[in-house]
Image: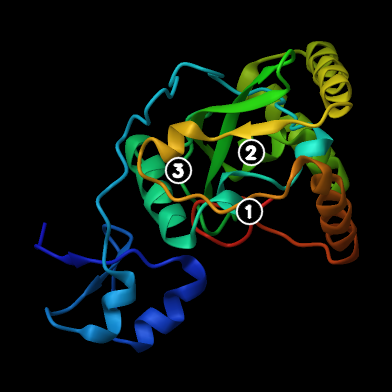
Amino acid sequence: MVNRIWLDVPYAEKNRAKAAGARWDPAAKRWYAPREGMSALEPWAAAPDVPDLLPGEDRSLGEGLFVDLVPSSCWFTNVRSCVTPRDWERLRRMITRRAGTRCEACGAAENRDAERWLEAHERWVYDDASRVQRLKRLICLCTDCHTVTHYGYAQVRGLESKAFAHLVKVTGMSHAEARSHIRYAFDVWEARSANAWTLDLSILTDAGVTLRRPPRAGERRGVAAATLAAERAVPRSGGWGAVRGSYVS
């Protein structure tokens, strides 16, 4: 590969970077400076890559496709909302690279014509005694698998039938088994949603990722209610929580 002067350009800043002289490498899917000494591009100078294995990360946690509902008290408080845009770009690049640019649940690649993107999903563990929600893995999912994973959000967006069909297709469950799986996931979700959880993102901070203060536990229900109201008022198509950088659940 040509020796590039790589840049970390958040999706929302790509037009500014391009206007400042940045160029896009379609093979690497990354912005770069075409020559040295371009001071206008200094705000996006690349930081060291995030390690492929985050400190304390469990890459075996949550294999395959399943409904993985986030407690309502934690809705819309995800990794992307807790890190700086530039560090999100570093994480996005690492997640897709180590997954071989494939969904880690079904193996699908990105397909823009089908509006299937590669997206980031968090795997959490919950300590009921301490009320700590600890990030233990970041996984690359395609839009279809991510929609299944956040099944309640799929219902809000009118995508339940599509999500159900994809769950059955990928897992090989019967319809009865899939319905039982979904009921159990919602039972767990209801119990966890009764509590306020403290986020533990130490696998990120220990990797040198800078955090922004997320909404406090007592603020999250209001954030969730406002965001869901906006979702119902303005339907959207395509991916969400996307690694490509469009918007986030």
Label 3 or label 2, whichever lies nearer to me, is 2
Element type at marker 2?
A: helix
| Residue lying farthest to the bottom in this orientation | 19
Position of residue 228 measured from the top left corner of the image (x, y, whole percent)? 86, 53
Q: How crowded is the residue under tag 3: few (<14 C-alpha within 10 Å), some, or many (20+)?
A: some
Q: In this rendering, is residue 204 above or below 191?
A: below
**Residue 239: mark in rendering:** 1
Upstream in sequence: badge 3 or badge 2 = 3
- Where residue 154 appears, x then y in whole percent? 79, 42
Disc 1: CA contacts within 10 A as few (<14), some (14-19) or many (>=20): many
Residue at 37% over, 50% down? 93
- Indicate which disc residue 109 carries: 3
Above or below, 246 against 159 in this view is below
Residue 3 percent location from the top left of the image: 9, 62
Amino acid bearing label 1: Gly
- Label 1 residue SS: loop
In what quadrant of the picture does the N terminus appear?
bottom left
Residue that appears at 37% across and 80% down: 17
Q: Tell me, yes or no, whether the two marked residues, 1 and 2, touch with CB atoms within 8 Å.
A: yes
Image x and y of residue 219, in percent: 81, 49
Q: Which residue is drawn at 80% across and 46% down?
A: 220
Which amino acid type corresponds to the residue marked 3 in the rendered image? Ala
Residue 207, quarter of the rendered image: top left
Q: How far apart are marks 3 and 2 (CA)?
A: 13 Å
